[in-house]
Image: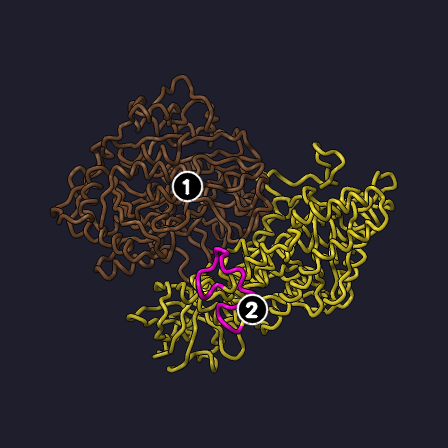
Chain colours: A yellow, B brown
Amino acid sequence: MTLLATLARVEAAASGRAQPLATVRHRHLAEHPMVFVPLTTAGEAGAPLGALVGTDPAAPTLLTVPQPRDRDLRFRFLAELADVLLPHLESAQDAVETVPRRSGEAAERCVDAPQLVVPNAGGVAFVRLLGRSMRFRRTAEEDPDAPHPAPARVPLLGRWLTHYGERARVPGSALLLSATELLTRHWATGQSPLEDQHLGALLAWLRAAEADVPGRDGGDGRDGGDGRDGGGGAAGARAALRAETERDAEGLLRTPPAGPATDPAFDNQRLAPAVARYDAGVFGAEAEIRTLLATQLRPTWDAVWEALERVRALPPGERVAARWEGDRWSYTAHRDRLRAGEPPQPRRDDAVTAARKLAARERDQARLSAQEALDDPLVLAGRRLAGEAFAGEVTAVEEAYSTGRRPMPRPLVTVRTGDEPQLAVGTKVYRVLPGDGRTQGGECAALPGPGLVTVRLTGGMGRGAQPAAGSVPVAGDTVCWTLFEHQPRGGPDLPDPEDTPWTHGGPPAGGPEEPDRATGEDLL
Amino acid sequence: MTATDHRPGPDHAARATQPADGTGPGTGTGPGAAAGPGAAAGPGAAADPGAAAAAATDAILADTLSHTARGVVVDSPPGAGKSTLVVRAAREIAATGRPLMIVAQTNAQVDDLVERLATAEPELGVGRLHSSDAHPYDPALDRHAQVRTSAKAADLAGLPVVVSTAAKWAHVRPPDDVPWQHAIVDEAYQMRSDALLAVARLFQRALFVGDPGQLDPFSQVGTDQWAGLSHDPSASAVTALLAHHPDLPQHRLPVSWRLPASAAPLVSRAFYPYTPFRSGTGPGERRLAFGAGADGSAVDGVLDEAARSGWGLLELPAAHTPRTDPQAVAAVARVVGRLLAREAVTADERTPRPVPLTADRVAVGTAHRDQAAAVRAALTALGVTGVTVDTANRLQGREYDVTVVLHPLSGRPDATAFHLETGRLCVLTSRHRHACVVVCRAGVPELLDDHPSAEPVTLGVPVRFPDGWAAQQTVLAELGAHRVTQA
């Protein structure tokens, strides 16, 4: 957490209102994202209980499992889920554009990619779990002898959800987003990051930020003694505590948890008796369970859409669309693998795949941090405060040339800054050129005095003997240099998996994966 | 009690049932392996540290040159002559006529190795493979006629030894014919598994040398999904290698030539509890003294304590502070300032006559870069120049006469995994030849008690001993005996 983010949290806690962490939106939001609010069965890993899913906030599709321990009912749920999700996930496969690749060949890329939004990090993990539990299933068509054949499209949905779940690990990606991650990226609350995972509590802080009177959140005044009340500015904390703990006369949470786990009181008092009635064959029990689950899901559903609206209200960052291109490539690549008839994603990455993923994610993390700072002065301020960037006015520009057979312009630009960058002579610095947005490189040539930095420009001036017009700042210009690269490159090429060296166990064994020995039939 | 009294007492001897040698035949010495009968217990039992170290080196070279195993792993505690071993092994491998590549982790390490190799054997052709950046290597290397430098591996083909960083080697395509027959991987515990994966196709067999007690490699992004896999890309190169080849011969160097007799027992006990080592010098062989007397301040008091015992703890009043705690930073700067102003002199086994302690032999270690920057600024304000100030990560592998450490947990309200990391404290407390002064806010033991280590345990990941929490407690308990309190 940057010092500025810490300050925002402290201010939020003091004022009782969420504080902005960004002035622009740093994640791509699709026009019509698919929102998926899942619930899982307590004590039964991977047994879905129900879900609200859809692209229209007013008309979600409710899917429920009346007896989560019944494998056939579970498959029915997954088949229904596939009927809703797959058309969305497959909707962008055929609209393509042709783009030149660096190698010179042309490549096909989908012009858009479907987006999936879940309430919180638990929802993202549940998407991964569903994907893992479905993608190795065999349908009756694939394997007529399988004892419990899966419905036709379930393995395919598993592969899509696995891909989306894996993509969500890539910094800055937006194929699969969680509402809490979206909100906490853009606002700071006065509670802990753990508490921020409660979507209801998080939104309570944000709503408090809009309340007219500081310290008053429109509450009924009953809840002054909640222990979080630090005096005048406790509106957000009070509202958040209410969202987390307030129960109705029957002891049920007024704001149900955003899942996938359910409120134990709801499980015990409502769900368990209803499931028992269903097991006993009582008429109407299944409809009752549907109604019950809807009461738990609907508030979260509305909360996710509220979160999306709040984030959508921010103007998108300049480089968000470029990052979304990465997601479109990812979507296209998965489409191609499916079309090529490749087997489902393996249970575990082999050595080379794991190393490649890690290298790509580290590059994307560096790129994301740089791009967010360039897109957003508030984020940049945090980097300046940390000594990773500095801004100021140009006080002098001195012509200079490189030594060598063909002297190139290497002007010396002196900047007066109030920032305290962690510079030494020779440190590389970067700035965005006004106009075309390209990056200009330089290096710290001298630190001539307190608050003064002299930068030797080393690039971005064209190939001529004179710098290209506009590429060298003049005295009086305001410039901002960063110590971090704007387009960090990835690491080196790794060997192909079949060339895995001896140090890492040699090439992975080919062929289909063996089931776990401990759980013979289970390919989870 | 002072640190010079730390000849192994009964307590230490009881812990140190493992001989610090690694010289026994076979040397399949994992932490729990039984000691050979000839290697009797306890530091002090083996008569001559030089002989013990020489025996270990001979065993390592025998395994390396015999070609019975594809890899040989050498664990080296701080200052145990790792670089000397690498240079010697390189010369002996080169003497057999097998092309050798050396993989180090930073350009400074590569330049240092090339310099040592060239000095040790002026006839040996050494290639320095470097990046295509503006100042890719230390220009001092150019004065060695035998050293050829290039950004292209092809230009260096045929040289007996080629040295470069792991990052640069990763861009070298394997040659069409035979890759390098032998490699030496230096600082292998600081190299990540994925970096080894990128270079391992270049060589047939390798000697892996490193210090398991220093900082583990890390990643800025989450790597939990691979935890427990034998090829977890974020693990260290040695971890991955041994996970796939547990039978490779493992050795360790038994003697720290850097750490004084006052420091080796503590560092060994706190950070290498199952693989103890000893100092190459005995009590009293390293001496630090001051030309000017003390002014009665706490700063001078802690310097006197450090000169006498090898350790000093300057304790500031308990407080929760920002990372760049202004008082602690000022105290660190004053300690350094007084150390130089009081005309410190050192004497040791190399230079028995006292020589003045110069600023370039002093280092300040911190946990964070902003702390280092704050200390640098404070030193500049005091008019002190030439002192190295850096984070633990960057001080790895370096050696100084006196170090001043800003304790990683000083002033913190919490003890995170980052600040508890064993390697961080180990690096900070094992850089010195004479004395180490730690500056810290009071209350760290209580902080540790409030934050028992609660890292998740992952299946398939060997639990590391000691954990940072235990190591911190051990070090603090020892430092407590050398405490000087500043109001």
Q: Chain of mark 1?
A: B
Depth check: give the residue in front, B78 or B367.
B367
- Secondary element at tag 2: loop
Q: Position of residue B332 (x, y in %)?
A: 26, 52
Q: Which residue is mark 2?
A: A218
Query: On screen, A202 above or below B359?
Result: below
Depth check: give the residue in front, A140 or A297.
A297
**Which amino acid type is shown beneath numbered disc 1?**
Thr
Q: Chain of mark 2?
A: A
Depth check: give the residue in front, B52 or A26.
A26
Residue positioned 52% across, 38% down in the render:
B239
Q: Which residues are magenta?
A: A212-234
* Magenta stretch, overall SS: loop
Q: Which residue is mark 1?
A: B422
> Are the residues flagged by discs 2 and 1 from a single subunit?
no
The image quadrant where one finds the N terminus of chain B is top left
Assess whether mark 1 and mark 2 are in contact (beta carbons under 8 angstroms): no
Judge the density around disc 2: few (<14), some (14-19), many (≥20) Cα neighbours within 10 Å. Answer: few
Q: CA distance from mark 2 to mark 1?
A: 51 Å
Residue A124 visible in this rendered orientation of the protein = no
Q: Position of residue B368 (x, y in %)?
A: 38, 54
Q: Position of residue A425 (x, y in %)?
A: 34, 64
